[in-house]
Amino acid sequence: MFKPHVTVACIVQAQGKFLVVEETIHGKVTWNQPAGHLEADETLVSAAKRELYEETGIRAEPQYFLGLHQWQAPDATPFLRFAFVIDLPEMLETAPQDDDIDRCRWVTAEEIIGSAQLRSPLVAESIRCYQQSPRYPLEILHNFNLPE
């Protein structure tokens, strides 16, 4: 049976810059959006808010649904990644709560798209989608029997 990993990601933008989290994976520094796995009894939106707080210390509400990416990692692990937009009026200070996060950085779209240290190609693809794709109201995501 096909069982993809379901993840959420927050594309956080302020003053023309995007928030990335730095993690060291197998000795290599990588960049990602604040992101992580959906947990049981959790909505996609609540998972996005939780991951944003855990990885950056920022509490903010997703404003739009950006899109869904299906990807297979080099080790053949399948992923479904739900991306959310959070536009902030200013760059906020960060304080990661998750010990796996080395630090957070505000960087340009060009720095992300041109980086060789992305955790996956979905990091750059999410930025391209932010730049080119429409945003969808969160109401298109329906939750049944799940707490908000």
Image (tube, rainbow, N blue to C red):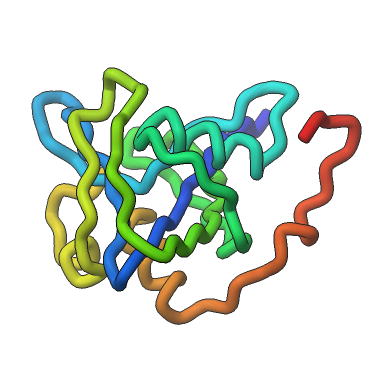
Q: Position of residue 99 (x, y in %)?
A: 28, 18
Residue furthest to the right: 145
Residue at (56, 64) in percent of width and height: 66
> Is 119 above or below relative to 103?
below
Residue 17 appears left or right of 36: left
**For residue 147, which quarter of the picture?**
top right
Residue at (43, 57) in percent of width and height: 11
> Is 146 above or below relative to 134?
above
The number of callouts visible is 0
> Is 131 above or below relative to 82?
below
> Is 122 above or below relative to 26?
below
Q: Position of residue 108 (x, y in %)?
A: 21, 67
- Is residue 125 at least partly visible in the picture? no
Residue at (54, 32) in percent of width and height: 50
Q: Position of residue 107 (x, y in %)?
A: 20, 60
**For residue 113, which quarter of the picture?**
bottom left
Residue 15 appears left or right of 24: right
Q: In the rendered view of the protein, which quadrant contains the C terminus?
A: top right
Q: Nearer the viewer, residue 104 or 72?
A: 104
Residue 142 appears left or right of 1: right
Q: Position of residue 94 (x, y in %)?
A: 29, 39
**For residue 58, which quarter of the picture?**
top left
Q: In the rendered view of the protein, which quadrant contains the N terminus?
A: top right
